[in-house]
Amino acid sequence: MSGSAAVVAMTNVRRVYTSVDGDRFVAIEDLSLEVGEGEIVAIVGKTGCGKSTTFNLLLGLEAPTYGSIKVLGKDPYGDFDYFRSKFGVVFQTDRLLPWRTALQNATLGLEVLGYLESQQKEIARYWLEKLELGGFEEAYPHELSGGMRQRVAIARAFSMSPEILFADEAFGHLDQSTAKRLREVFLNLVAETKKTCLLITHNIHEAIEVGSRLIVLGKPSRVLYDVRTPVGVSRAQAADLEDRILTIIEANEVVQV
Amino acid sequence: MASGVTDTKVATSTEQGDALSRVLTVVVGKKEPIISLLVVLAIWQTLSFFLPKYFFPSITTIVASFAEVVTTPELIGDTVITISRIFLGLLLAFITGALVGILMGFSRLVEKYVLPVLHFIMGIPALSWVVFAIIWFSHVEMRIAFILLAGCLPNYALIIHDGIKGIPKEYYDMLRAMRPSRGQLFQKLILPGVLPSVLTSWKVNLGLATRVVIVAELVGATQGIGKKLLLAQELFRMSQAIAWTLILVVFLLLTQAILLLLEHRLLRWRPAKEGGMG
């Protein structure tokens, strides 16, 4: 897909869940996709199209039933420990540990990496500051608003300077204006740090706005449509593309580019 | 946390929390509890005027007995022995119970086999353990330790198991994406995540152990509060029986207050109103 070496490569991936009663559920039918270095890819699709499963597979939290997954040239499940600090992840909910302050949440990844305490704090403070959370370092998650909590989560993801950033519906549960602002902040940081970034979303508008490339997933998971989304598209162009993608998702058929 | 076991646990801890806050207000000086206390004392004192002294000793007699219990070195020894037995028994039960709880929390297999056994054991009355202990062991301290262990272990195991189960999977995934070592996962997630449950388990078991140890001491102990209570009964000394009972109540309230302080300190991250994830 991309000229540069693939950072993420999924080849004929299939993921089947078997319940205790022996019922089988196919979450991912046959998914192949590649993401090149420095790309910002938005993956969009209907609820239940296997987006979250794809996410868990890429993070190496579970193994595919069939097919191969390579991230940075290695198997994220098989070579589990290789990926220490390689992934910066922003989840749908902030997943801040409630017993840790904003600062302590932001240092989590650095603690795992074994940084000295003074370094951890310095780096985490820098990122919190960058996310406009200066002065809230000692606040516990329940004392912060939803938007602020998600900012802490973003700081946590960036502070260990990961190779790849993943965002799974990261702005989905916030109100529109907060989501818009936070998306901008996040994308600016991605651009500034030149990281490869994978965003999963059900929001087509968001997908067009954030990505340099957009992948539409069908149900069950397979790539329906894969398109570059140049920066600075006009409002009309974006609206066109949005309509088009909506039609593709509804039709649920593969579009050859 | 979803299981029915949790609900009962939460209820128990809330009840105890209420009792505690009441006692605390006594200490801080809210008027209602003091009034209640005075009314009870007044009724008692009135009864002591009309009824035989060995049924209702006057309050001054009770106070004198209490003063004797807390100032006579030999009698202080009895208190110390009983409290030591409580803590030793609890420590033993905590170590084994926590281990069982952790194993159940991380192994579905262990959980499937052990959980029903624990629920079965929970149904055994403390008095049955007393009988078993007398039959199985000859050494008095062994009997007492066994009775406390059998009584308190299931609580520790079940509450800690619930605590581990209650740590959201989302947190595991979040942390595992960073690739922590096993030790880091335990230290950064499981330990702080299970801490509220550990505190709850101590609150529940301190109350249980304080009640059970007395029964346990009735079976052959030559020293301890239980023995003294038995003596007071044989000699028909109501004021002494009350004095010894008061010692236990004071001990329980004090330890509960300490646990409450500890909880405030360790769990200050919890929102004021919600129960949190404990």
Image (spheres, grey):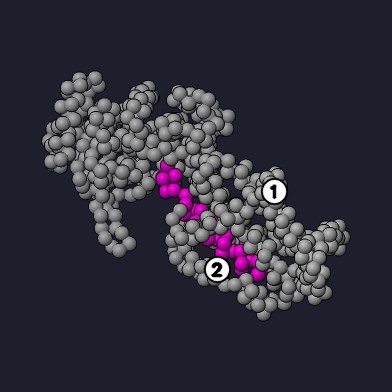
Residue A245, magenta (yes or no):
no
Q: Residues within 10 Å of mark 1 (few under 14, many from 20)?
A: some
Horizontal relation, residue A189 to residue B104: left or right: left
Q: Which one is in front, A16 or B256? A: B256
Amino acid type indicated by mark 2: Met
* Residue on which the image places disc 2: B122
Q: Which residue is mark 1?
A: B26
> Picture coordinates of residue A124 (x, y %)?
50, 29
Of residues B135 and A146, which is closer to you in this image?
A146
Query: Could you tell me residue A104's position as x and y percent?
Result: 53, 35
Residue B177 visible in rendering: yes
Q: Main SS type for the magenta part? A: helix
Q: Position of residue B107 (x, y in %)?
A: 46, 59
Residue type at mark 1: give it. Answer: Val
Residue B171 in the magenta stretch? The answer is yes
Question: Which of the two discs, 1 and 2, labels the residue nearer the N terminus?
Answer: 1
- Callout count: 2
Callout 2: few (<14), some (14-19), or many (20+) C-alpha neighbours within 10 Å?
some
